[in-house]
Image: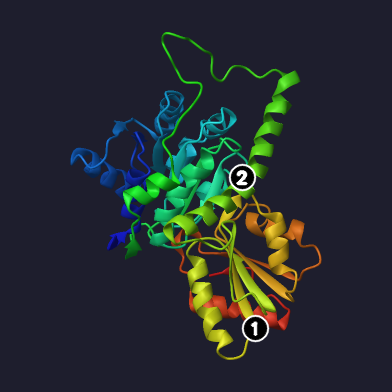
Amino acid sequence: MKSVVEASEAVALAVKLARVKVCPMYPITPSTHIPERIADYIFDGEMDAEMIHVESEHSAASALIGSILSGARSFTATSSNGFALMYEILPILSGMRLPAVMAVANRTLAAPINIWNDHSDAVSARDQGWIQLYAESSQECVDTMIQCYKIAEDKKVSLPAMMCLDGFTLTHVFENVDVPEQAQVDKFLPAFTREDTLDVNNPKTFGPIGFPDSFMGFKKQQQDAMTAALDVIKKANSYYKKQIGRGYGDGLVELTDMGDAEYAILGMGTLCGTAKAKAEELRAKGKKVGVIRLRSFRPFPVKELQAAVKNLKGLAVLDRHISLGSNGPLFTEISAITPELKLFGYIAGLGGKDITLKHIESVFTDLEKGKQSREWLM
């Protein structure tokens, strides 16, 4: 079914199609429209689920623990400092191997107070054991939300997942979206089942203390699950494309005009749409340029990225986050796996600052000249 919907509603539609049963929610801009739409579906009888109106984002994340341990497919959404308030619970959900799915409407972290987009909320939690997939369009929001449950609930993974979408730049934008039929989603995503659940008639302990002799073993298991997720993400993307008709690169990385590219820009989220538009314009003028969109930030697809850049003369990495006192996190990670490549790192789009076609053109110009003119695209 094709319709024009806001990206936030696209997320909510995907949650409904995934037959989510429990949604603990505390609204925060710019993710607020997501729980609003879900509340409408529940009130109108379109969605058989319970929405828990909690008193904070910390409570929303905490409620996910109980709902999933009760055997319910669960969902929440948040942004910015609300995401930061969840921080205590994020590694607990991962460490307990609970396949929660959360939409993160990416918004900068205060201060100064700012409601607009960058990636400083989700990227700051890159080490907490959550899968992180970044969408570029409203259509991808629908498809990725559904895929997130398939990935997170896979027995080889059993980890929570974030579906990240740029605040306002995407959350509040209306686009044409092809919404899958319920029967298609049901075939792709079976009902959630869990072997161990909370049961008053059969008490069990979940999340006990991990002593030094066992703690590292648990962390190793999480790391192994993240590694396994690389293949699971690829297979989910491929299976979704076969069943429903859409896929995004190999699921981990999406390449545009990279066949003969000499120079490329690498980034995440909506900025890649701007980069693609400028790359198309430059290619019409004979420039051999391309775009690499990183869809999966966690797990980090080292081999796929190395293969994507192996024939380049230069690569520019655009970060919508700054690790203060260091560099952009994406630039740092790419640097570690491409030591022989001429690499430029740029900080861009912080706090909702527009990343324009002129910015992108200046980056491609830097690459061609072999000299970086600036590090901050302001």
Label 2 and label 1: CA atoms lie apart by: 33 Å
Q: Secondary structure at mark 1?
A: loop
For the view shown, which residue lies furthest in the right direction? Answer: 340
Residue at point 68%, 61% (across, down) = 305
Label 2 CA crowd tier, 10 Å (few <14, some 14–19, many 20+) = many
Q: Which residue is mark 1?
A: 288
Residue 111 visible in the displayed image: no
Q: Amino acid at mark 2?
A: Ala
Kindly indicate the quadrant of the structure image that contains residue 331: bottom right
Q: Quadrant of the N terminus?
A: bottom left
- Residue 366 location (% of width, % of height): 66, 79
Q: Is residue 270 above or below residue 55?
A: below
For the view shown, which residue lies furthest in the left direction? Answer: 44
Kindly indicate the quadrant of the structure image that contains residue 229: top right
Q: Which residue is mark 2?
A: 229
Residue at point 36%, 38% (across, down) = 20
Instruction: Specify which label sits upstream in the sequence, 2 or 1.
Output: 2
Q: Amino acid at mark 1?
A: Lys
Label 1 CA crowd tier, 10 Å (few <14, some 14–19, many 20+) = many
- Residue 202 location (% of width, % of height): 46, 9
Question: Looking at the image, do the residues carrying marks 2 and 1 touch, with CB atoms under 8 Å apart?
Answer: no
- Residue 97 location (% of width, % of height): 56, 31
